[in-house]
């Protein structure tokens, strides 16, 4: 099994929306069939607009966290399907080559476990993180 693109913004991918409160094309959580598993805006007890804004902010944070959990589940499935070999890939430089990409937390967790001796890992074509050129 090969899992390429283990860099921030690729895997895990950034959420394309902050949920139905801001995305005009998104269906409100209450109308979705999977609503029991999704965060939603809780306006119970709110008495002013500042309270509404705070609850919407809380919802957006919960939505991003939910999305991150879904990406983690996808990574788990991808990484546990290999019967013999698992190839994880990442590139320090993005499409434009203008800035250094951050490794995915999913990949760094695997690397940390290997460095701690908890996991057997063979690194192929490994290069250290590039140093920023300040000059």
Image (spheres, rainbow, N blue to C red):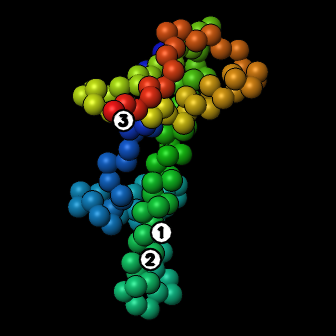
Closer to the camera in the image, 20 or 35: 20
Q: Which residue is mark 1?
A: 58
- Is the C-beta separation of discs 2 and 1 under 8 Å? yes
| Residue 106: quarter of image | top right
Closer to us: 90 or 44: 90
Q: Is residue 34 left or right of residue 76?
A: left
Residue drawn at (39%, 57%) of the image: 32
- Discs 3/2, front: 3
**Residue lying at the far right of the rendered structure:** 117
Using the image, tell me which numbered label, if any, was put on residue 54: 2
Name the residue rendered at 53%, 8% in the picture. Answer: 124
Mark 3–mark 1 distance (CA, rounded to whole Å)? 38 Å
Q: Secondary structure at mark 1?
A: helix
Q: Point out the image quarter for the C terminus.
A: top left
* Residue located beneath label 3 in the image: 134
Mark 2 and mark 1: span between their CA atoms?
6 Å
Q: Quadrant of residue 132?
A: top left
Which type of secondary structure does the marked residue at label 3 adopt? loop
Whichever of callouts 3 and 2 sits on the residue coming sooner in the sequence is 2
Callout 2 secondary element: helix
């Amino acid at each position: 099994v090969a899992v390429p693109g283990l860099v921030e913004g690729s895997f895990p991918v950034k959420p394309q929306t902050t949920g139905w409160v801001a995305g005009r094309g998104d269906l409100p959580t209450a109308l979705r069939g999977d609503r029991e598993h999704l965060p939603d805006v809780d306006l119970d007890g709110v008495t002013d607009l500042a309270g509404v804004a705070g609850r919407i902010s809380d919802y957006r944070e919960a939505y991003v966290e939910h999305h991150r959990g879904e990406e983690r589940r996808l990574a788990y499935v991808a990484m546990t399907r290999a019967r013999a070999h698992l190839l994880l890939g990442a590139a320090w430089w993005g499409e434009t080559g203008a800035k250094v990409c951050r490794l995915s937390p999913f990949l760094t967790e695997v690397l940390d476990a290997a460095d701690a001796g908890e996991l057997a890992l063979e690194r192929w074509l490994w290069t250290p993180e590039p140093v920023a050129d300040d000059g």
